[in-house]
Image (cartoon, helix red, strand yellow):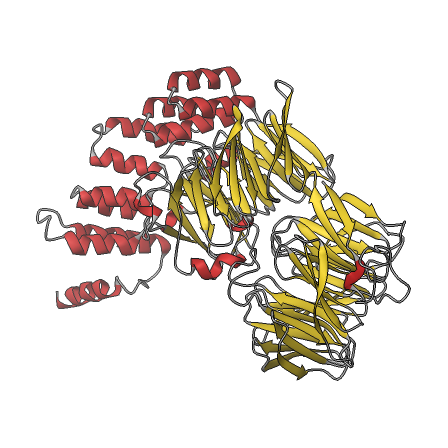
């Protein structure tokens, strides 16, 4: 990954300058106000009071308007809504400019002043539209932060003290504000009665801040020559080595895990975890300090304003994606080199438009330009399939059967033949579209999972099977906490599909994506804790998860989720101390997990026996699976086979596998199952009970009118309320059986063993009836 930069022509700084001059003039003003109005246009203004527009098409700049002579700009920000990537649609013609006398003005795209407001008693250091477009904030050197409506009406004063505020930014969800004063950083939630967080961040002044919409982390740059990364609670995640000069600007990429850092005569492109991709130095000619950095909405370009008045546009090139034998590298703005390391072939793919995004996997390369999507098959690289009308694609995720793209207008699922398979919609989906990121979406084998942005504990699951009802009416899965990361499994069979997710407490849960209903809340199972990232294997249902100082591999996370014993037997945790710090999961192809640390790729193999075992189980080759377990002779193999075989009603195999895994209690239970009538309601219910599906077992018995057995099941589970409800409801249908009396008798035994009086409100009336009956006798 590298930055490719160019210094723009200088007719933009003074109207009388020669446009051919690219070196800074002595009377050039510092350029501290730069932002993108679309992916092709940059607006900027300096102390000469003139607003200029630079176009990527004409590669030149023109004067748009002139500000009053007493209005010296300090910050500039465009409002981009209605598809933030396009820079078009509702609200995209609104420009906010702040000044050093405490005023701010709101202009439309015709440069007409809509509002001019005196907001502060000193210079405004930051003026920013909120991510949801509902309002704006202004932060001043008078120590005050104010929230304004979109039309410029004052809503509230959220911060008020005497210390000057250097920089302020919104949280991605518009519910908090981060700002810096001196060497401290503070986070102020906007909710009523909420407390602020404040911590010492740098030895000198904090000069710049940026809050990532992708990872919910904060970057800061200071006069101590370092940039640092923090989480939303103020914990330090990364501290850079000291640079030669102060860090004057930082900016997170809106669509990718990139961080751009600016200092004197240098730009640095970093990963969001802190390690550096590339540095671009400007020594001949010198451009000075980078005062402001602004990424384009699609995340492919950055506009930079410098202390010498230069406007510099940077592009991220040499992005690499690797999948098995294929490696794709963006060599320029309009070309990608595709290399097949298996046969040594290399093709350079040129595009008529700028490449915005690309994805690689399962033998296909999907490339999105500004207005098209190109689909390449590795076997027919010279004949791509082209989809027109997909503007400014923000996310591409490649799956085994389909690929998914998120663009400026909607979410789309396509087949590799270019046919539209699904355009998923759910309540509020269009309003949430600008705030969706790649962390909010996950494409599985036959399911698309989307996290709801208005309620981040809600997950929408779309079935991708042709003709499935959930294509247009998704099932919604409700978690207990907010979801931080989601991952739908990418392999398996149609009946074995799972979705895993990490919540705000960093706990890992898993659930089936099929046969779910609102009543089956027990389908969500917790299988891990303290997770920072997760990823499914490309060809098997093996899951890898990353902790702070180790990583875990779940060899049977789906079928074994309901049984903690199986999860314990099939989970392996290994140390990552030798890898270093700030590790991320780059890919999980076949049996190789690739971690990335400080830019280095670290491949690690999972158990090849487990990987081959999963492949044979997907194909239903039970005898072959048994041979693999006997050859490997490891408890994780046997436990995986046992869990899958039990789920598929292969009781003979389950018994042998559990026996080899030394699960004697389960062997005894399976022997009891074999004594029951095959395929009877009793056997199916007992099998569901073994899989941890108590509600399913009860439903089977009630559906087959086995009311006595259903009551007995509830009593075995000590579900006293349910046992009494079933007995009362179905007593009339079993006149020969006094089920109610049996339940009350078992309850009496239970209370006697506990040596307690009855406390359950549902049982108290029956106790009173018994006492009255005894007294009358």
Left or right side of 618 for 351: right
Question: Toward which corner of the image does residue 756 lie, by quadrant?
Answer: bottom left
Residue drawn where x is 17% and y is 56% of the image = 728
Q: Residue at x 55, y 68 (%)?
A: 133
Q: Is 529 or 579 nearer to us in this picture?
A: 579
Q: Is residue 149 above or below residue 90?
A: below
Q: Residue 685 appears at what percent x and percent y?
A: 27, 38
Question: In the displayed structure, does residue 568 sit left or right of residue 717?
Answer: right
Looking at the picture, tell me which residue is in the foreground, 776 or 708.
708
Residue 421: % across, % down = 38, 41
Q: Is residue 542 visible?
A: yes
Residue 763, compared with residue 362, is above or below; it is: below
Q: Nearer the viewer, residue 88 or 131?
A: 88
Decide: is 679 above or below 388: above
- Is residue 566 placed above or below 371 in the rendered structure? above
Q: Answer left or right for 765 relative to 249.
A: left
Quadrant location of the C terminus in the rendered image: bottom left
Residue 220: percent from the left, percent from the top? 75, 59
Res 289 quadrant in image? bottom right
Residue under the image location 57 percent in, 44 percent down? 369
Percent position (x, y) of residue 675? 25, 27
In the image, taking residue 226 as reference, residue 358 lies left or right, namely left
Would residue 291 be seen by someone viewing this image from the given angle?
no
Q: Quadrant of the N terminus?
A: top right
């Amino acid at each position: 990954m590298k930055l490719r930069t160019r210094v723009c022509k200088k007719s933009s700084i003074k109207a009388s300058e020669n446009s051919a001059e690219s070196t800074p003039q002595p009377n050039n003003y510092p350029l501290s106000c730069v932002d993108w109005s679309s992916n092709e246009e940059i607006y900027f203004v300096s102390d000469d009071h003139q607003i200029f527009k630079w176009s990527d098409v004409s590669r030149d700049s023109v004067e748009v308007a002139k500000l009053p002579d007493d209005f010296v700009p300090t910050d500039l920000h465009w409002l981009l809504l209605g598809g933030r990537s396009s820079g078009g649609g509702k609200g995209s013609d609104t420009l906010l400019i702040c000044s050093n006398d405490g005023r701010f003005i709101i202009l439309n795209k015709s440069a007409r002043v809509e509002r001019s407001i005196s907001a502060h008693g000193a210079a405004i250091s930051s003026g920013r539209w909120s991510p949801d477009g509902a309002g704006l904030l202004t932060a001043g050197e008078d120590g005050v932060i104010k929230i304004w409506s979109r039309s410029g009406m004052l809503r509230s004063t959220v911060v008020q003290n005497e210390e000057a505020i250097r920089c302020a930014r919104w949280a991605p969800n518009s519910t908090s504000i981060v700002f810096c004063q001196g060497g401290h950083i503070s986070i102020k939630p906007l909710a009523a009665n909420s407390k602020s967080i404040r911590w010492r961040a740098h030895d000198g002044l904090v000069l710049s801040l940026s809050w990532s919409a992708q990872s919910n982390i904060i970057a800061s740059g200071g006069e101590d020559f370092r940039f640092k990364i923090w989480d939303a609670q103020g914990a330090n995640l990364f501290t850079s080595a000291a640079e030669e000069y102060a860090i004057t600007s930082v900016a997170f990429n809106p669509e990718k895990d990139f961080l751009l850092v600016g200092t004197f005569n240098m730009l640095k492109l970093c990963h969001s975890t802190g390690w550096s991709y590339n540095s671009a130095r400007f020594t001949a000619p010198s451009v000075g300090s980078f005062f402001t950095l602004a990424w384009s909405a699609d995340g492919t370009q950055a506009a930079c304003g410098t202390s010498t008045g230069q406007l510099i546009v940077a592009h991220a090139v040499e992005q690499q994606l690797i999948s098995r034998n294929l490696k794709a590298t963006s060599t320029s703005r309009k070309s990608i080199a595709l290399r097949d390391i298996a046969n040594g072939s290399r093709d350079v793919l040129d595009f008529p438009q700028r490449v915005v995004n690309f994805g690689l996997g399962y033998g296909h390369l999907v490339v999105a330009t500004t207005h098209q999507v190109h689909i390449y098959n590795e076997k027919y690289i010279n004949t791509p399939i082209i989809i027109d009308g997909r503007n400014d694609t923000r996310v591409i995720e490649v799956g085994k059967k389909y690929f998914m793209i998120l663009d400026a207008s909607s979410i789309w699922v396509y087949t590799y033949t270019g046919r539209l398979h699904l355009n998923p919609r759910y309540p509020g989906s269009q309003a949430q579209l600008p705030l969706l990121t790649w962390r909010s979406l996950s494409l599985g084998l036959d399911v698309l999972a989307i996290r709801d942005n208005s309620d981040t504990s809600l997950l929408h699951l779309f079935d991708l099977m042709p003709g499935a009802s959930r294509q247009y009416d998704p099932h919604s899965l409700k978690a207990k906490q907010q979801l931080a990361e989601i991952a739908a499994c990418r392999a398996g069979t149609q009946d074995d599909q799972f979705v895993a997710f990490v919540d705000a407490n960093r706990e890992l849960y898993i659930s089936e994506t099929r046969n779910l209903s609102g009543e089956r809340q027990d389908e969500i199972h917790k299988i891990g804790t303290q997770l920072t990232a997760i990823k499914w294997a490309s060809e098997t249902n093996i899951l890898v998860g990353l902790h702070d100082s180790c990583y875990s591999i779940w060899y049977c996370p789906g079928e074994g989720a309901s049984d903690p014993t199986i999860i314990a037997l099939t989970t392996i945790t290994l140390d990552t101390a030798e890898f270093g710090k700030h590790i991320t999961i780059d890919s999980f192809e076949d049996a190789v997990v690739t971690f990335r640390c400080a830019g280095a790729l670290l491949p690690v193999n999972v158990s090849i026996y487990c990987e081959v075992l999963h492949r044979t189980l997907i194909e239903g080759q039970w005898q072959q699976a048994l041979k693999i377990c006997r050859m490997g002779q490891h408890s994780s193999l046997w436990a995986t086979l046992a869990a899958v075989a039990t789920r598929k009603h292969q009781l003979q195999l389950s018994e042998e596998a559990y026996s080899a895994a030394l699960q004697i209690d389960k062997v005894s239970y399976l022997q009891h199952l074999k004594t029951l009538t095959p395929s009877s309601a009793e056997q199916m219910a007992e099998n569901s009970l073994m899989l941890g599906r108590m509600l399913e077992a009860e439903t089977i018995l009630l559906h087959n009118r086995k009311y006595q057995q259903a009551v007995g099941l509830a009593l075995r589970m000590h579900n006293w309320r349910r046992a009494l409800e079933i007995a009362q409801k179905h007593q009339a249908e079993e006149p020969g059986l006094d089920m109610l009396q049996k339940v009350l008798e078992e309850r009496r035994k239970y209370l006697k063993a506990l040596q307690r009086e009855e406390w359950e409100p549902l049982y108290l009336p029956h106790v009173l009836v018994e006492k009255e009956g005894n007294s009358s006798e």
